[in-house]
Every structure is written in C-alpha cells, then in structure tokens.
Image: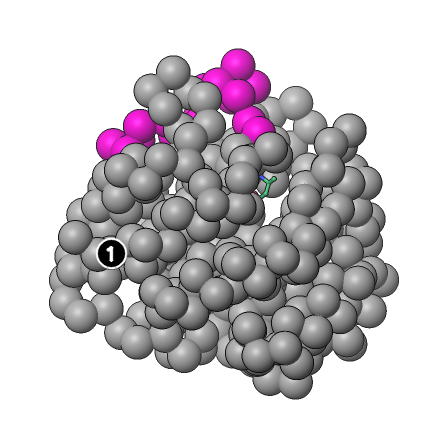
Amino acid sequence: MQPLIITCAPVGAELTPEQTPHLAVTPKQLGAVAAEVVQAGASLIHVHCRNDDGTNTHDVARFRAAYEAIRANSDLIVQFSTGGAIGMTPKERAAVLQLRPEMATLTCGSVNFGDEIFENSFPIMRAIAAAMKEYGVRPELEIFDKGHLANARRLATEGVLALPQHVDFVLGVPGALEASVQNLCELVRDLPEGCTWSVAGIGRQQLPLAMAAIAMGGHVRVGLEDNIYYSKGRLATNGELVARIVRIAGEAGRPVATPAQAREILSLPPLAGAGIGRVAS
Ligand code: KMH
Ligand code: ZN
C-alpha cells in the first residue's frame, strides 16, 4: 500500500470560535497549526480563512498571508478551498486560484448542506475548473454524494477536467451521502481509473471512516473543519486528530507519507526549495 497521506482541514467556513477555543483565526495561528500538524504527521493542509473577528472570508490577501504563514512553518502541500461558504458567488470562490496554490478543491455537484444548499451547478463547476486550468492548480475532487463521480466524468468528457485526479469523499454532511463504510466501498468501486482517494467523515464518523481508509489503501482527512471532538464531550486540537491517525496507521503497518512523498503520490512537482512556495506575487 502507498504511504498514507494525512490531510488536515483545520478551519472550515462554518465553525465558530464559540464552538472551540482551537479554531485558527489569524494567519499566524494558521501557521502555528501548520507547524503542529506537519510535526504530527500531516502532509497536506486544506485551507479556509477567517477575519480577525473569526468570521469567514475568502479574501485573496488573507489567503496569501495564510499561505505565507503556513509555508514559513512547514513544507505541507497547501490546498485552498474553492468551496468557500454557502452563499458565496463562484467568482469569490475562484478568486483565490490566482495565487496559484499547489492544489485547490473542486466540488463535483450541488448538495443539501444542513438546511441550506451548497450550489455547484455545471456552469459553476466549469468556471472553477477552467480557472484551475488557467492558473495550473491541481484539483482535488470533493465528492459529497454518489452522483458527483458521474458529474466529474461528465466534466472530463467535456474536456474541462483532466482525469485521473485525487478525490476526497466527504461523507456525513446532513443532507448528503451518509458516512458509512458501505457507502465508502461503493464510491471507491466507482472511482475513475487511476484516481487516488481520501475520506473525510463528518463528526463522530471521522474516526471509523479514517480507520476504514487506512485498511483499504486510501488516504485520510481529519481536522476541526469536519469534527471538533476527540471523544464524546472532549474537544480536540488538530494535532491530536492527526497524531491519532498516525498511531492507528502504525498499528496497521501502514507508513505515513511525508509531504515530499505525498507530492510524489499525487504527481505534484517537488517544492522548489526550503520555504519557497509557488503562490504568485
Ligand atoms: N464550506 C462548505 C460549504 C471545500 O472547502 O471545498 C464547502 C467546503 C468544501 O468546505
Ligand atoms: Zn473546506
């Protein structure tokens, strides 16, 4: 089996500082999280940003500052969110691509998201995929529901998306596909040829789905974006969530990928040099 890529998604768009004291708000705090999770064993960081008051933002300058803080503290693969938050325009969501991060997410379909709708119509997906192509950003396909893989195939047939890609199954969002090992197995069976995959279980399903992925040869996403608890009633830090996956992988005999190994697995170019990223100036 390939070394295990552990993605950390520390922030998200929905979490509030009232829910956990461990939410990284400033770029400096995000840089500290990067140091903590790379030390613990993560190789990829999925980035959302906050204003100083903790509210969500997709401001390009804030993403640049976040990128610089992460890169100053780690060689993690940096992946920007283009999912953003519910209600953002596609233009706002895609604007961060101009910074040319190594990776960014491409959500492959609309879905109920609690009481709201996370809108990813074909025109939205095409626009974000085209911006990724323009800026040379590698997509990670976010799959919240079974039909989303078919949507990715359709985008590939249209020529707006190259396949294979790295795929992240986000399971357990209220209103989308439930987080179960059976659903995960069905999605993996339906993966386009040559894709690598990870799973992000929401809430208390984060751990069991991560354990299944470790056993199945997939990769794992953990972090406060998807789950704020270490165990019932006990809030987690991002570092603790990553460290637990490293321990479980160790028990299972699965080596954990360094960021350099993760770049190889994902066919990303190596970092040009220590502390040097490719975010455009
Ligand atoms: N905040 C969600 C509406 C992504 O980052 O690409 C979307 C999201 C997915 O978090
Ligand atoms: Zn996200």
Q: Is mark 1 within 8 Å of ligand 1?
A: no
Residue, x 36% and y 24% (percent of image)?
51
Stretch in magenta: 14-32
Q: Position of residue 29 (x, y in %)?
A: 30, 31
Residue, x 16% and y 60% (percent of image)?
276
Left of 112 or right of it: where is 50? left
Q: Say if 11 sits above or below 9 in the image.
A: above
What element does badge 1 sit on?
loop
Q: Say if 230 sits above or below 144 in the image.
A: above
Residue, x 70% and y 74% (percent of image)?
154
Q: Position of residue 265 (x, y in %)?
A: 44, 77
Q: Quadrant of the N terminus?
A: bottom right
Q: Position of residue 24 (x, y in %)?
A: 39, 30
Residue 16 or residue 161, whichever sits in front: 161
Q: Amino acid at mark 1?
A: Val
Secondary structure of the magenta portion, mostly? loop
Residue 108 visible in the shown view: yes
Q: Which residue is mark 1?
A: 279
Quadrant of the rendered image containing residue 66: top left
Number of numbered discs present?
1
Residue at the outermost right position: 182
Queried whether the magenta region covers residue 18, the answer comes back as yes
Left of 37 or right of it: where is 276? left
Queried whether the magenta region covers residue 128, the answer comes back as no
Left of 35 or right of it: where is 139? right
Q: Position of residue 81 (x, y in %)?
A: 47, 48
